[in-house]
């Protein structure tokens, strides 16, 4: 046993994240940690790595346990060189390196310092640190960090690049337990394959927060945070779906049974009360005692019954009988509701790209041909940095008749005059970050000349699982990654576009939300141009694949 969490309780403000949460992690096991957006997955990692001590319950760890975890904020290390940041966060590295570098100049004949120096050299070798700088540099380069960025300060990195740095830091640590938060967001398919290979081969235990189904397909166990506790499922993603379908149906049966029992007790209380009021003498006393006993049973059962969160994936639902599906529809957990406009404008070409060569000082790529008609889907595939986002920005600049940030070296981009584009971007426009969510939603509609009222904004927030009162007041910058993703969906669809451009839309979304997005895209009659390294998503959306390469 590495870590044992018992009866963990955690409250943030008025929101209770956990009540009596239990979790045990064994040496060497790979755990996928899942749960709805904002349910407390990252907070749980903070409890396990010791950075969050504000909780109730007990946390037991194996003596001498070494934990490595990814950091979320980097303000305090903004000016530290990237390579130095990685190395100094490795277990014992900073202390040992100081002894090795400093002691030869001062130890002289001091036997205690000589012994410490000798021990440090030995330990440095045991940890494999003599070539660690070279290995760290190579891994950072494998994640496509340029040499100048590797030796430059942390503040020069993008959000995605900082995520890669955190991943390299954890994978090199060789800790007993690695805690990793959403590792594959912003990764291209090559980098993701490399991470999955590392995860499968890693000897240490790993807890990874992810809704990337390719990653969940190789874990030993999936732990889901739900209903203020955890539910554990042995095996990988496919096993989770099957087990979740069975346990959810069993839980619904139990919930229905408890509701019927509660209703029967209520009727019995009412009947005992009616008889007590009609009776007199000893009979009235007997009925009063019966009423009190039944009322206690009713109150005890009512206090115990909490409606669980019910979610079953659509593939498992298709295997179930109609009666069970009807029951699920009655009790299922609320999911986001994505409304797409019916497009009835025929099969004309919306985007016509011929032999395009695009770049900055020199071309990033050349020879791209793309003809996207109404109702069609096209996937842009390629490594990070080859120009996929530059290509998308060029389409948007052409649509908005604004100056291109890049240069066309050859070919052309021609768009239909009636094109209306909705964009899902990985990064939220900075102008929205300080706005309260409700105001930001209102502004996205007004900017697109779409009528919006306070009532409509409240309904939209509710459709996307926001609290129309509390969440509406939160600045966008304070939302979780999943909540920001849901805002991006609202913004993308507000004007009823006939072309959707999606850049890694499944990043940060939880599994039910991803499934709802896939269903919405299946219903959508407009055109879709998308970038995604989620193989489940790309198989579901389909379409022609356009390879973008140098």
Image (cartoon, helix red, strand yellow):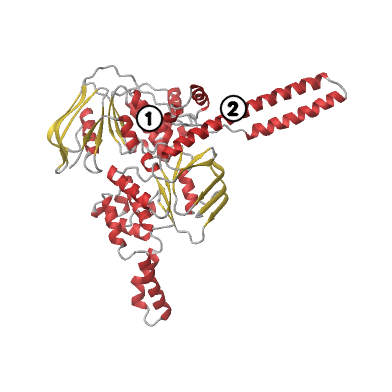
* Residue 186 vertical placement versus 399 (above, below): below
Residue located 53% across and 52% down the image? 4
Q: How many marks?
A: 2
Q: CA distance from mark 1 to mark 2?
A: 30 Å
Residue located 39% across and 27% down the image? 442
Which corner quadrant holds the C terminus? top left
Rendering coords of residue 91 (x, y %): 40, 61
Compare marks 1 and 2 and give the one earlier in the sequence.
2
* Residue 473 vertical placement versus 343 (above, below): below
Of labels 1 and 2, the one closer to you: 2
Horizontal side of residue 392 vs 363, given as left or right:
right
State the residue in front, 251 or 282: 251
Give the residue at mark 1: 517
- Label 1: few (<14), some or many (≥20) within 10 Å? many
Return the mark for residue 256. Answer: 2
* Residue 336 vertical placement versus 7 (above, below): above
* Residue that lies at the very extreme toward the right in this rendered image: 281
Camera sees residue 37:
no
Rendering coords of residue 406 (x, y %): 18, 38
Circle 1 SS class: helix
Camera sees residue 20:
yes
- Label 2: few (<14), some or many (≥20) within 10 Å? some
State the residue in front, 250 or 438: 250
Return the mark for residue 436. Answer: none
Rendering coords of residue 501 (x, y %): 28, 31
Circle 2 SS class: helix
Rendering coords of residue 305 (x, y %): 61, 33
Residue located 55% across and 32% down the image? 250
């Amino acid at each position: 046993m590495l870590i044992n969490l018992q009866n963990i309780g955690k409250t943030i403000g008025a929101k209770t994240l956990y009540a009596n949460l239990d979790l045990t992690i064994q040496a060497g096991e790979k755990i996928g940690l899942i749960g709805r957006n904002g349910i407390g997955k990252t907070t749980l990692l903070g409890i396990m790595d010791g950075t969050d001590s504000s909780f109730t319950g007990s946390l037991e760890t194996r003596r001498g346990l070494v934990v490595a975890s990814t950091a979320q904020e980097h303000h305090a290390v903004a000016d530290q060189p990237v390579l130095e940041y990685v190395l100094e966060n490795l277990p014992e590295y900073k202390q040992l390196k100081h002894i090795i570098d400093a002691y030869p100049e001062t130890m002289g004949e001091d036997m205690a310092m000589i012994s410490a120096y000798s021990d440090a050299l030995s330990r440095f070798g045991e940890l494999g640190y003599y070539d660690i700088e070279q290995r760290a540099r190579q891994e950072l380069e494998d994640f496509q960090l340029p040499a100048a960025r590797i030796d430059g300060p942390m503040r020069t990195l993008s959000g995605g690049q900082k995520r890669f740095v955190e991943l390299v830091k954890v994978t090199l640590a060789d800790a007993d337990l690695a805690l990793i938060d959403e590792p594959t967001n912003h990764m291209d398919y090559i980098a993701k394959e490399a991470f999955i290979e590392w995860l499968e081969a890693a000897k240490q235990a790993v807890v990874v927060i992810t809704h990337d189904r390719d990653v969940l397909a190789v874990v030993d166990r999936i732990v889901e945070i739900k209903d203020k506790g955890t539910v554990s499922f042995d095996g990988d993603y496919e096993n989770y779906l099957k087990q979740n379908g069975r346990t959810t149906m069993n839980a619904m049966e139990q919930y229905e049974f408890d509701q019927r029992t509660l209703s029967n007790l209520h009727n019995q209380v009412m009947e005992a009360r009616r008889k007590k009021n009609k009776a007199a003498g000893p009979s009235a006393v007997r009925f009063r005692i019966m009423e009190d006993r039944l009322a206690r049973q009713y109150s005890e059962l009512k206090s115990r019954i909490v409606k669980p969160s019910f979610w079953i994936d659509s593939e498992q639902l298709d295997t179930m009988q109609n009666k069970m599906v009807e029951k699920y529809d009655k009790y299922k957990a609320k999911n986001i509701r994505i409304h797409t406009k019916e497009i009835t404008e025929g099969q004309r070409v919306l985007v016509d790209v011929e032999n395009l060569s695009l770049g900055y000082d020199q071309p990033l790529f050349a020879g791209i041909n793309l003809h996207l008609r109404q109702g069609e889907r096209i996937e842009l595939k390629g490594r990070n940095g080859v120009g996929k986002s530059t290509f998308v920005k060029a389409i948007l600049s052409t649509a908005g008749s604004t100056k291109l940030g890049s240069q066309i070296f050859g070919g052309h981009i021609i768009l239909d005059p009636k094109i209306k584009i909705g964009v899902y971007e990985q990064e939220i426009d900075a102008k929205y970050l300080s706005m309260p969510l409700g105001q930001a939603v209102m502004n996205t509609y007004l900017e697109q000349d779409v009528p919006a009222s306070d009532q409509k904004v409240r309904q939209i927030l509710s459709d996307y699982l926001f609290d129309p009162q509390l969440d509406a007041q939160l600045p966008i910058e304070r939302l979780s990654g999943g909540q920001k993703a849901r805002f991006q969906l609202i913004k993308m669809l507000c004007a009823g576009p006939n072309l959707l451009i999606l850049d890694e839309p499944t990043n940060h979304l939880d599994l039910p939300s991803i499934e709802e997005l896939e269903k919405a895209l299946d219903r959508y009659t407009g055109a879709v141009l998308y970038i995604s390294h989620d193989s489940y998503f790309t198989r579901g959306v389909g379409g022609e694949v356009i390879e973008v390469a140098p």
